[in-house]
Amino acid sequence: MNNRNCWRYENGKEFLDRLRQGMPPVILCCACNGGMQGKEYNDNLPETADEIAESVHAAYVAGASMVHVHARDPKYLPDPARSTEIWFEVDSKIRQACPNIIINNTTGGGIGMTMEERLSSLAPKPEVASLNLCPDMSRFRFKARKPPLPHPRDEFEYDDCVPFTYRQIRWYAEEMKKRGIKPELEYYHPGCSWVVDYLITEQLIEPPYWIQTVMGIQTSSLPTIDNLLQLLRDLPDDTIWLCSGIGPAQLPMTTLAVLLGGHVRLGLEDNIYYRRGEKARSNQQLVERSVRLIRELNREVATPQQAREILGLPAATSAERTG
């Protein structure tokens, strides 16, 4: 491995070497809202472009160097954005609020989107964009969205699969490469290793590879220590590792990532609670807790510029990129 920020995270000897040398600062990625749940689950979850920008700014001030974004349709907020115009508005407001933060737009999207609509998030040229490595099969019962919330809807059940195939994944990777966008590879279970190898062989991604282990979402790996360590064993060399945990798994999984030398994703997309029975007041509150834990565990929090250096991104800030 040539990148000093990459090593075998699960290797005991390399872990001890890193403890002696000092581990790199932690990249904090704030997943600010998500494309499925809304204020019907937590009043503090941002939905509009202005709310997203305000929430992201507070998380940035608290220590987040990257934000993962799901834009919503302003005409019907429970739905994901399907047009480039909405994405330009959301990203523009984030860039105005905090020009230095790394913007990471979703291509996972939300319910009912076509595969082409999911690509609309790439138009504003974020520095990073998520790229799912396998089909996304889920079954949820969504709570009713009741007045006085705008755009109320009844309770309903979602039971479907988003068909991420090799062909679709290649298409997305090619579009990202064309625009100079670094893929954040969403790694759900051991089978995703085949797809990472395919992308490397086809020269569709470049090192260092930015790979997120998604722990605890339906049909992903169960969020256990054993499972996480096994996923790390299968990651390619020259990987920068990011970890997320869904719901009650968020704090254990992200803390484990800090201990092992990895990086952290947290936020209201993945977890609407601060602790059992207490809903989070904001993304800022979740970031502030992670910052405290990171420093207590003898690591530093990466600035956006440090995060760019670790990930091999251009030094230009997000605000300097144009769509």
Image: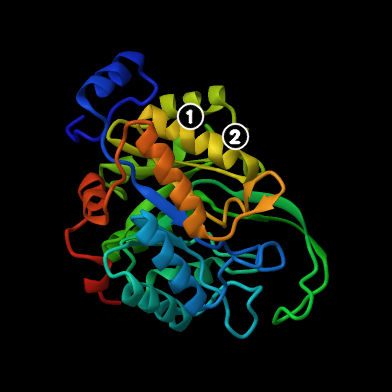
Q: Is residue 152 above or below residue 63?
A: below
Please give the name of the residue rendered at 44% of the width and 76% of the height, measured from the top-left corner: 90
Q: Secondary structure at mark 1?
A: helix
Q: Is residue 72 left or right of residue 256?
A: right
Q: Is residue 242 visible?
A: no
Q: Residues within 10 Å of mark 1 (few under 14, many from 20)?
A: some
Using the image as rendered, state which of residue 315 and residue 303 is in the foreground. Answer: 303
Q: Is residue 79 above or below residue 201?
A: below
Q: Which mark is residue 18?
A: none
Q: Which mark is residue 231?
A: 1
Is the Cβ of the residue at disc 2 closer than 8 Å to that at disc 1?
Answer: yes
Q: Is residue 257 visible?
A: yes
Q: Residues within 10 Å of mark 2 (few under 14, many from 20)?
A: some
Q: Disc 2 marks which amino acid? A: Ser
Using the image as rendered, state which of residue 67 and residue 140 is in the foreground. Answer: 67
On the image, the x and y values in percent for residue 311 come to 26, 47
On the image, the x and y values in percent for residue 199 come to 36, 45
Where on the picture, by quarter, is residue 39? bottom right
Where on the picture, by quarter, is residue 15? top left
Q: Disc 1 marks which amino acid? A: Leu
Please give the name of the residue rendered at 26% of the width and 23% of the height, measured from the top-left corner: 18
- Lower sequence index among marks 2 and 1: 2
Query: Disc 2 designates what residue?
Result: 221
Please give the name of the residue rendered at 71% of the width and 78% of the height, measured from the top-left corner: 149
Q: Is residue 234 left or right of residue 215?
A: left
On the image, the x and y values in percent for residue 323 come to 30, 77
Q: Secondary structure at mark 2?
A: loop
For the residues labelled 2 and 1, the Cα–Cα distance comes to: 9 Å
On the image, the x and y values in percent for residue 1 come to 21, 29
Using the image as rendered, state which of residue 131 and residue 306 is in the foreground. Answer: 306
Where on the picture, by quarter, is residue 44? bottom right
Using the image as rendered, state which of residue 302 and residue 211 is in the foreground. Answer: 302
